[in-house]
Image: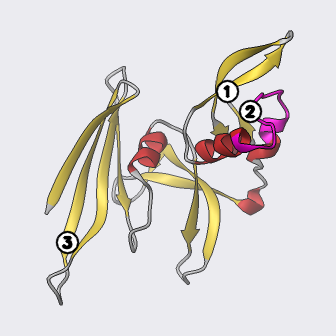
Amino acid sequence: FQLTYAAEINKKPFEASLNFRRSGATDLYFFNSYHASLTHSNGATREQLFYLERGKGVTAKEAYNLLDGRAVFKELSNKAGQMYKAWIQLDFEKRDKHNNHEVKQYHEAYGYDLKGALSRYPIAEMDGGDKEKALLQSLGKGNIQAGGIERDGGITKLFVEANPQFKSIN
């Protein structure tokens, strides 16, 4: 069976159809996947099917960020069950055999250092404390995060997002 979810995030309609399946051996039901869609202000809609495994996968907010073009830092597992961390980003130019956008991965060995990319700029939140930790965590979830740059003796507000493909920030 399916349940639907609809919300407006940052003035953009986001919808998800949550797919549940009954076990063949018991009366238990499992949440296996969800189909998410995001409609942009120009009317274009991006869609993707996200699979879950043992309750782990891409969250709805992360799906929103991926469909909005940003990267998300995730702990993933390979076919042997070994865990690894990587930035993932949807490739809107390529589709797989199920008509989903292909997922680009930037593993730790790729060399993207978010903290290092941020440290190239005088970002006020990069203070080594709780504000820095919160900024790094939020950017890792694919969010656009408000921050400030120290300029001319004051703080200029800006928005920051991670860009692992080019080992930088936007």
Q: CA distance from mark 2 to mark 1?
A: 7 Å
For badge 1, the amino acid type reads: Gly
Q: CA distance from mark 3 to mark 1?
A: 43 Å
On the image, the x and y values in percent for residue 142 come to 55, 43
On the image, the x and y values in percent for residue 145 come to 60, 32
Residue 22, quarter of picture: bottom left
Mark with earlier residue (3, 1): 3
Q: Is residue 126 magenta?
A: yes
Pointers 2 and 1 in contact (C-beta within 8 Å): yes
Residue underneath mark 3: 21
Mark with earlier residue (3, 2): 3
Residue underneath mark 2: 125
Residue underneath mark 1: 147
Q: Nearer the viewer, mark 3 or mark 2?
A: 2
For badge 2, the amino acid type reads: Glu
Judged from the image, the secondary structure of the residue bearing numbered disc 1 is strand
